[in-house]
Amino acid sequence: MPEKNNKIITENLNFYYGKFQALKDINIKIGEKKVTAFIGPSGCGKSTFLRTLNRMNDLLGEVRIEGKVLIDDSDIYRSDVDVVTLRKKMGMVFQSPNPFPMSIFENVAYGPKIHGIKNKNTLQEIVEKSLKQAFLWDEVKDDLNKNALSLSGGQQQRLCIARVLAVEPEVLLMDEPTSALDPISTLRIEELIQDLKKEYTIVIVTHNMQQAARISDYTAFFLNGEMVEYDRTENIFTKPKDKRTEDYITGRFG
Amino acid sequence: MLTKPKDRKELLINGFLWAAAFLAVAILVFILGYIILKGMGHVDLEFLTQKPRKMGSEGGIFPIIIGTVYFVFLTILTAAPLGVGTAIYLNEYTREGKITRIIRFGTELLAGIPSIIFGLFGYAFFVVLLHDYTQGWSLVSGALTATCMILPTLVRASEEALKTVPRSYREGSLALGANKWQTIYKVVLPSALPGILTGIILSIGRAICETAALLLTLGGSLLMPESIFHGARTLSMHLYMVAMETGNMDVAFGTGVVLIAIILLINFTANYAIKKLVARNR
Ligand SMILES: Nc1ncnc2c1ncn2[C@@H]1O[C@H](COP(=O)(O)OP(=O)(O)OP(=O)(O)O)[C@@H](O)[C@H]1O
Ligand SMILES: [Mg+2]
């Protein structure tokens, strides 16, 4: 659907939790350096879909996946794919902020360290750069050794974003990143997303329709594991083609 | 003044609970106080630094303190990696299934077995069968026996501690591209450490208090243990043996005081360390 440069493509993607089919024949093309929003009622499979994109679902017990997920045109479910490299490339921000119980510095340095960066100065630079990118630097620069859990919810979420940026991903997968936050923190994260879009491909799950309308270029509407409609955001919100999309965005159900 | 029936009932219950709590503490204080009063007089520098004479009825308990320390260290050295390792395997590397259920059932079963049975096993296995490797009655045999004895508790406590680590920590780490072991080592274990330490402390307590199983495996030598292949005697054993063999109750009570002091010391330091760790994790 979007222009020429597609970062993520899925082909006939089906996903099962045991016998339960959570995703049904998903075909989507997600544009590079665009913000794509997933909307839909609770339980429709948005998170499940997001988690198939960095293979987080692999961690669960009885799951099965059919079809293809192509990132930069290569199938990430091929057996020779290195999951570590994949996850590094596909940064993920979770619904509730989940900083590690360590200092702010250690949280951001965690990823780079894991990936082999040992030099103190380099780490310092990465931490500073990432925190600045996440618009958190000014608030925490004086106590980087403070425990991350003592930050406010909004700060914690921005820290989690900084932590992801520190490993230099290409894609940001965000699962309702503002659902646990107050309006001001939400606004800051939305601004941040607008800013990050210049460099990153962003996929964001949200329950907040205004949010999707405000920040995304494309929107996909999910219902019961199916992708009902996928289009430019303004089209979805002004002239949806499918009756179910219209019902959902006008608040008639869900 | 009139009180409503409900209030009276509550007062009664409160009163009873208070009395129960008071009694429990009072009994504890009485026992500790009694032993300390009876034994304190016997504890002096000589008692702490001299070798025992005449089967322990005279002289001091220095080699026994050292033996106890060696024994505890050796036990923890073998038990902690095994116990924590098992817990990590059960909790992080396997999905709930037949194997985990069997292992868990096994550890629970072992936890309910009287320690003297472990002593018997340790005697037959470590002391007799593996004599060439353990030198019979020795710190090695005793520590290995104690390891078998405390392993179930340790596995259980470590597992509980690992279970309290939120899944979101693991997911956060894995999503950054960390592999499983990095996630466990850098995120999961540090968060679980306070709980694991508590388990280790409880286990140390059990090992220090043990007598019967150690009589069969550690021997009971009064000499200073020169290596881990020498026999030794822990304070609990000494207390029992002195009381039974020489009837010198003063020495027994004195040993008791030292034993209590060591246990309290371990507990206070551990609690302090755990509090520090918890504070760091908050
Ligand atoms: N681990 C799991 N095991 C079994 N079923 C699951 C699991 N996770 C999700 N499901 C089911 O799959 C379906 C899709 O769940 P998913 O979490 O993807 O929905 P969602 O669109 O993200 O919902 P929400 O908006 O509430 O977060 C739901 O019916 C859910 O019950
Ligand atoms: Mg969800």
Image: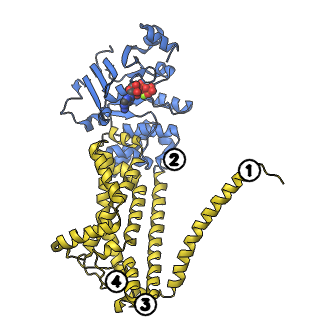
Chain colours: A blue, B yellow
Left or right: A17 with respect to A250?
left
**Amino acid carrying mark 4 in the image:** Pro
Using the image, determine if residue B218 lies above or below residue B222: above
Which tag is nearer the camera, tag 2 or tag 4? 4
Whole-Å distance between the Cαs marked 2 and 4? 49 Å
Q: Which residue has dot 1 on it?
A: B7
Q: Nearer the viewer, mark 3 or mark 1?
A: 1
Q: Residue B155: horizontal and vertical position, in percent?
A: 34, 56
Q: Considering depth in this image, is B215 or B91 the residue closer to the camera?
A: B215
Q: What is the crowding at mark 4: few (fewer than 14 residues within 10 Å), some, or many (at least 20)? A: many
Q: Which mark is residue A150?
A: 2
Are dots 3 and 2 on a single chain? no
For the residue carrying disc 3, how many other residues have a C-alpha within 10 Å: few (<14), some (14-19), or many (20+)? Answer: few
Residue type beneath disc 2: Ser
Residue A113: image location, x then y, percent: 32, 47
Q: Chain of mark 2?
A: A
Q: Quadrant of residue B11?
A: bottom right
Q: Are marks 2 and 4 on the same chain?
A: no
Mark 4 vs mark 1, CA separation in Å: 60 Å
Where residue B204 sits, quadrant-wise, is bottom left
The chain letter under disc 3 is B
